[in-house]
Image (spheres, rainbow, N blue to C red):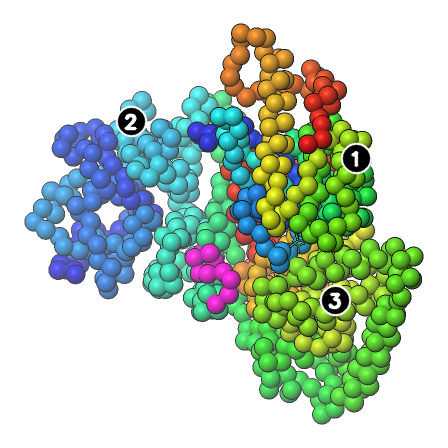
């Protein structure tokens, strides 16, 4: 516990970034006894706004996680706990304090990273490396990444590891800061998230909070997240990766005589915080209907559902509307009649294939092919879910009957793998053959281009995804292109069945629900607001839309009218190869090695949220 | 960075939907079998490093979706493959007949010297068998491709199939290495295949029915 008072603290400085496990290897003018001590390397901001790099030996730092003194609550990246400087200040404090090394950023001239990211040297005078630090965790590049947002630097031509400071950059970069702090809880639990959030709140960085509005999601909806397939740490890892790709060197290198100037690439504006509404309740849903059951405020209802979802108890009923089975403006009586007609229609189509004799079937190869595909897939659909588990499960028969009837409903399209994945959650929710069939029909109508014979719809989506990624995260796009994955084929499954395979059923209900609305919103409500799975995704959407360098290509992908300012799809400085050729199969993911494949896997987790 | 393997081979599994490609791969990589598998959408992959004559060989195995509709996506993965497993289901005549189409697909999309192997899977289901072993062998002779019947369920010949394919690729690679490195001057380092020096017929002679 803190035994000292705040007055003992000589100055009110703020730690912007801290890195633990850093040894002092060499320092001009310091006694040898000071060397090889382990400590913390920080970037700090002084009260007057100036910044410096500061190294503090560990014996000066005490751990005090209960501190009330939030001015001093320093979240560091390696120790994964809170540390303060206000702890037990001993008699040795003065001597210890003398061992602190400060390098004002104003004075910093050059710095370099050597020895496999393990060593960093600083100089305030050309020709002399005054201080040398050793990074125990070999992660000096993280420090550099952060430092680069406080000083404008350029890599020297002769030595790629040496940076010259062009001028100190006073603006602090929100995303980097967040990144530094996010790193803390990659292996931690909700408690830490709470701490972090409260920490954020006490700091005058609302922008940080905004950028990571998703954090509050984890906290507030934390129980949901842990009940589902994905746990909190996974979400956090995802956030971390996101923030990394967002901060990932937003710079380009241009050549100069002496050195290469690193200039800032156009980046996205800060992500706005889009709060999620409350789910549509049973009462509200009933209240939306007039006395005869008509719903007139259709756009309004869609907005409500889109923003807040629906209470699970009315999901069954709501989906029938969202999937165009029940027309919004029908009265209760009309719906009953409608349902009756649809039931008859269903059973007459079902009879068509049910009454097929073996002989007929043997002379009808196209039908046979479709039937065999259905049979194979029904046996492989969500069999781990209790609803579909076990031998002779009657629900499998229903699944099969609906899919076979759909074959008769749309014989040309027939059965395509992935359809059983899409039907399964619908059947699970509605638990009624006829209703599920027509809702499935409604959903298929929305995503039918995913199942084009020539895969044109999928190719187009993958191309758009690649273009969006190039716009929103050029570095990631470039990396993928380098690894022969610019064709985005690794996203194929996500897009084909709407992430059905990637999430728990519970999450899938919510996600699909948004998908049902997307096309409706795209045609009716666009220009006002377009939404996504959750507020983070929508936030990203707004980031992209309000980016100053937004071009028509991206505008069109997002469903906006082109402004005809720039219509070229591939500009000269586009870092990624033209992807049309890749989509045509001229590139293959097989060029990559496994580490790179793993990277792609990480991306897998990230991209759906960014780009859906 | 230190490599944990001497060779990296990229393999591909193709064949009709439901013949058991994913099951075979799961057996090979996890040594397990799961009756309620999910169909493959698009592509997937697994890794296993095996020991071949003292060399660590890392197998990066790509599993494709069998359905015709996904052909445009899956054929993109043919090109980089060094070995391709053609799988049919011995209880499904159609999947056997389609092997010819799959071979044509390889000819159109894969590199000319890719190693191939035909697998007749589900040989544990003797009661339901529609394709005899002899017919499988005949087909293999016709195309000069190695052939073996497998069962992912009973773990029959799965290891053998992958080892055989990997060994053939390794042998071919080392042969090329020798061809481009005159005797005595062996560097011992894995060499890039020299497409120009390739003798397209050389491998045919070695191929036989197992
Ligand atoms: N009895 C038996 N069943 C098998 C064997 N291999 C696969 N199966 C079953 O056959 C079905 C299809 O297997 P998969 O491995 O999913 O088939 P696939 O070739 O990957 O199919 P797609 O992904 O659709 O292209 C599953 O239900 C498996 O349990 C086998 O060796 N013996
Ligand atoms: Mg499969």
Q: Position of residue A124 (x, y in %)?
A: 30, 30
Q: Do we see residue B27 in this rendering?
A: yes
Q: Which range is magenta?
A: A227-236
Main secondary structure type of the part rendered in magenta: helix
Mark 1 packing: few (<14 Cα in 10 Å), some, or many (20+)? few
Quarter of the picture holding the C terminus of chain A: bottom right
Mark 3 packing: few (<14 Cα in 10 Å), some, or many (20+)? many
1 and 3 marks on the same chain:
no
Quarter of the picture holding the N terminus of chain A: bottom left
User: Who is closer to the viewer here, B155 or A461?
Assistant: B155
For residue A520, side relative to residue A57 (left or right): right
Distance between the alpha carbons at the discs numbered 1 and 2:
75 Å
Q: Position of residue B207 (x, y in %)?
A: 71, 26
Circle 2 — which element? loop
Q: Nearer the viewer, mark 1 or mark 2?
A: 1
* Mark count: 3
Q: Is residue A435 above or below residue A380?
A: below
Circle 1 — which element? helix
Residue ID for mark 1? B138
Instruction: Pinpoint the chain carrying mark 3.
Output: A
For residue A112, side relative to residue B130 (left or right): left
Residue ID for mark 3? A400
Q: Is mark 3 within 8 Å of ligand 1?
A: no
Circle 3 — which element? helix
Q: Which quarter of the figure has residue A73?
A: bottom left
Q: Which mark is residue A129?
A: 2
């Amino acid at each position: 516990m803190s035994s000292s008072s705040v007055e003992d603290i000589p100055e009110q400085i703020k730690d912007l970034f801290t890195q633990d496990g850093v040894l002092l290897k060499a320092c001009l003018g310091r006694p040898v006894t000071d060397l090889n001590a382990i400590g913390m390397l920080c970037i700090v901001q002084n009260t007057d706004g100036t910044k410096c790099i500061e190294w503090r030996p560990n014996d000066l730092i005490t751990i005090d996680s209960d501190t009330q003194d939030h001015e001093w609550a320093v979240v560091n990246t390696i120790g994964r706990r809170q540390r303060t400087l206000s702890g037990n200040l001993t008699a040795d404090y003065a001597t210890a304090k003398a061992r602190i090394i400060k390098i004002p950023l104003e004075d910093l001239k050059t710095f370099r990273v050597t020895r496999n990211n393990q060593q960093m040297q600083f100089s305030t005078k050309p020709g002399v490396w005054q201080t040398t630090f050793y990074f125990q965790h070999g992660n000096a590049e993280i420090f550099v990444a952060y430092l680069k947002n406080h000083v404008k630097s350029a890599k020297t031509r002769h030595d790629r590891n040496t940076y010259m400071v062009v001028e100190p950059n006073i603006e602090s970069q929100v995303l980097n800061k967040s990144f530094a702090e996010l790193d803390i809880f990659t292996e931690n639990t909700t408690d830490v998230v709470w701490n972090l959030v409260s920490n954020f709140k006490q700091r005058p960085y609302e922008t940080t909070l905004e950028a990571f509005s998703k954090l509050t999601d984890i906290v507030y909806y934390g129980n949901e997240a842990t009940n589902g397939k994905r746990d909190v740490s996974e979400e956090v890892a995802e956030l971390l990766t996101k923030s990394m790709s967002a901060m990932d060197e937003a710079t380009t290198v241009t050549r100069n005589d002496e050195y290469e100037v690193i200039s800032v690439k156009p980046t996205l504006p800060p992500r706005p915080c889009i709060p999620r509404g409350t789910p549509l309740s049973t009462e509200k849903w009933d209240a939306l209907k007039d006395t005869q059951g008509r719903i007139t405020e259709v756009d309004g209802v869609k907005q409500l559902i889109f923003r807040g979802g629906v209470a699970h108890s009315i999901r069954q009923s709501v989906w029938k509307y969202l999937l165009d089975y029940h027309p919004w403006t029908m009265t209760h009586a009309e719906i009953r009649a409608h349902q009756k007609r649809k039931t008859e229609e269903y059973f007459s189509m079902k009879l068509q294939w049910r009454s097929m004799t073996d002989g007929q079937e043997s002379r009808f190869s196209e039908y046979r092919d479709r039937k065999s595909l259905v049979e194979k897939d029904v046996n492989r659909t969500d069999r781990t879910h209790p609803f579909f588990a076990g031998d002779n499960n009657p629900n499998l028969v229903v699944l099969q009957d609906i899919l076979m009837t759909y074959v008769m409903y749309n014989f040309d399209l027939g059965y395509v793998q992935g359809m059983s994945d899409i039907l399964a959650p619908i059947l699970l929710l509605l638990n009624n053959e006829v209703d599920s069939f027509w809702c499935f029909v409604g959903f298929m109508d929305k995503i039918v281009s995913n199942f084009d014979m020539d895969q044109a719809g999928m190719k187009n989506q993958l191309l758009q995804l690649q273009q969006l990624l190039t716009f929103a995260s050029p570095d990631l796009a470039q990396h993928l292109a380098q690894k022969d994955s610019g064709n985005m084929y690794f996203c194929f499954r996500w897009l084909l069945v709407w992430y059905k395979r990637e999430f728990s059923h519970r999450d899938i209900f919510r996600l699909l629900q948004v998908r049902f609305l997307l096309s409706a919103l795209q045609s009716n409500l666009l220009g006002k607001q377009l939404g996504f799975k959750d507020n983070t995704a929508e936030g990203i959407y707004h980031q992209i839309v309000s980016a100053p360098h937004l071009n028509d290509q991206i505008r069109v992908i997002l469903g906006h009218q082109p402004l005809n300012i720039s219509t070229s799809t591939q500009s000269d400085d586009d870092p990624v190869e033209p992807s049309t050729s890749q989509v045509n199969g001229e590139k293959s993911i097989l060029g990559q090695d496994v580490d790179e494949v793993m990277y792609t896997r990480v991306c897998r987790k990230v991209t759906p949220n960014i780009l859906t | 960075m230190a490599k944990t393997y001497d060779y990296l081979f990229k393999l591909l599994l193709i064949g009709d939907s439901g013949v058991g490609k994913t099951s075979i791969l799961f057996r090979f990589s996890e040594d397990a079998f799961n009756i309620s598998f999910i169909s493959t959408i698009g592509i997937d992959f697994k890794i296993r490093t095996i020991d071949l004559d003292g060399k660590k060989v890392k197998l990066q195995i790509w599993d494709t979706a069998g359905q015709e509709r996904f052909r445009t996506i899956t054929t993109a993965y043919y090109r980089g493959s060094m070995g391709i497993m053609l799988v049919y289901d011995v209880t499904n005549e159609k999947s056997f007949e389609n092997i010819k189409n799959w071979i044509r697909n390889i000819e159109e999309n894969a590199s000319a010297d890719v190693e191939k192997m035909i697998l007749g899977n589900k040989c544990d289901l003797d009661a339901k068998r529609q394709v005899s072993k002899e017919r499988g062998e005949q087909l293999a002779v016709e195309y000069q491709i190695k052939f073996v019947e497998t069962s992912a369920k009973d773990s029959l010949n799965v290891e053998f199939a992958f080892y055989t394919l990997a060994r053939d690729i390794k042998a071919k690679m080392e042969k090329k290495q020798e061809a481009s490195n005159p005797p005595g001057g062996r560097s011992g380092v894995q060499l890039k295949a020299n497409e120009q020096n390739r003798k397209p017929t050389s491998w045919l002679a070695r191929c036989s029915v197992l």
